[in-house]
């Protein structure tokens, strides 16, 4: 499965963006997750959506971000609202969790190339 992330860009504080993660194959039955990585920092879990519909969010984005998926389009989404400068990072999507720790990036089988999100103050 190849993943293509898109939808990033430059927005002002308080703005919104919707990221998309288009898969070349079926994602039904897979966990879909978003991570982010800022310069000089480790990859950080943002949000995850299990195949059964369970969701998990990092505390820093809870209430502002929403993860979803459209299995008919083999695409995952991350709706981001009330964006802050601290949200600035490259956002990466991942699928196929091997294990149960949805927040562990090492357990994902497939990764997209990332899309840059920059929030200006």
Image (cartoon, grey):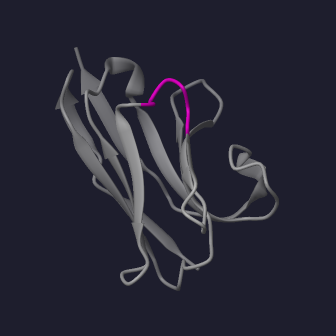
Residue closest to the far top: 121
Q: Which residue is pictured at 24% across the width and 44% down the height?
A: 17
Q: Does the magenta stretch include residue 92?
A: no
- Up the image or down, 70 lies above or below 80; here it is below
Task: Give how far across and how far down residue 43 sits, in percent.
Answer: 63, 36
Task: Give how far across and how far down residue 61 sits, in percent.
Answer: 44, 30
- Up the image or down, 70 lies above or below 90; here it is below
- Up the image or down, 61 lies above or below 13; here it is below
Residue closest to the far right: 99
- In this picture, which residue range is highlighted in magenta? 57-62
**Relative to the observer, which residue lies in front, 5 or 78?**
78
Q: Which residue is pictured at 21% across the width and 37% down the height?
A: 16
Q: Which residue is pictured at 55% across the width and 79% down the height?
A: 28
**Is residue 95 found left or right of 60 in the rendered image?**
right
Q: Which residue is pictured at 54% across the width and 62% down the height?
A: 53
**Is residue 45 found left or right of 21 in the rendered image?**
right
Task: Give how far across and how far down residue 15 sits, in percent.
Answer: 18, 31
- Number of numbered discs overlaid on the protein picture: 0
Q: Specify the quadrant that holds the C terminus.
A: top left
Residue 49: quadrant of the picture: bottom right
Secondary structure mostly seen in the magenta stretch? loop
Q: Specify the quadrant that holds the N terminus.
A: bottom right
Residue 30: quadrant of the picture: bottom right
């Amino acid at each position: 499965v190849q993943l293509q992330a898109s939808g990033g860009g430059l927005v002002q504080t308080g703005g919104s963006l919707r990221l998309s993660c288009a898969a070349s194959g079926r994602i039904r039955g897979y966990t879909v997750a978003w991570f982010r990585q800022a310069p000089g920092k480790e990859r950080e879990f943002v949000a995850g959506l299990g195949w059964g519909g369970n969701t998990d969010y990092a505390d820093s984005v809870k209430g502002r971000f929403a993860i979803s998926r459209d299995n008919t389009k083999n695409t995952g989404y991350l709706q981001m609202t009330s964006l802050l400068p601290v949200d600035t990072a490259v956002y990466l999507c991942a699928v196929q969790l091997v294990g149960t720790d949805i927040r562990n990036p090492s357990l994902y089988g497939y990764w997209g190339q990332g899309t840059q999100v920059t929030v200006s103050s």
